[in-house]
Image: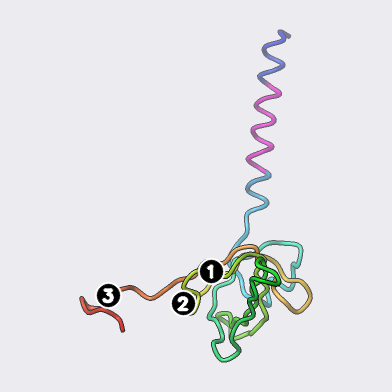
Amino acid sequence: MKRSHIIGIILIALAIGMIMSSLVSTSKYATFSESAKSPESDFHIVGKWDKEKGTIYDPQKDPNLFVFFMTDQEGTERKVCLHNSKPQDFEKSEQVVVIGKMKGADFSASETLVKCPSKYNNNKPVQ
């Protein structure tokens, strides 16, 4: 076998391996109870921020820790620890998507997506 054929086979095998590993490591949408069953896996959890419990964020002490309580679509509430800075317009959010994994009773998030209300509602500004 020629050297170029061997190199080509190795490159194809590496490409297949990379594609397979990216498919395996993708996270999926779930609830807190589903993510608790597989604490080693990453999940996307959709829910609402519990405004009554507020947030904990002290950028002087730790700028990469933002803590809040969230209720998922099943109604389960968990403490969420975002290991990143506080998202912009978090207080205006209608819905929050956290990406991460369960650590004990808390959810450890690496990312948060904030879904804010639309700016206009029936051509009238939201107040």
Q: Quadrant of the C terminus?
A: bottom left
Where disc 3 sits, the SS reads: strand
Front residue of 53 and 6: 53
Going from N to C along the chain, the mark reached first, 2 or 1, is 1
Residue highlighted by disc 1 = 87
Q: Position of residue 65 (x, y in %)?
A: 67, 70
Q: Is residue 92 left or right of residue 52?
A: left
Q: Amino acid at mark 2?
A: Ser
Q: Is residue 52 left or right of residue 93?
A: right
Q: Position of residue 78 (x, y in %)?
A: 67, 81
Residue highlighted by disc 2 = 93
Q: Quadrant of the N terminus?
A: top right
Q: Which residue is situated farthest in the top direction here?
A: 2
Q: Is residue 106 left or right of residue 92?
A: right
- Mark 2 and mark 1 residues within 8 Å of each other at the beta carbon: yes
In this picture, which residue range is highlighted in magenta? Answer: 9-20
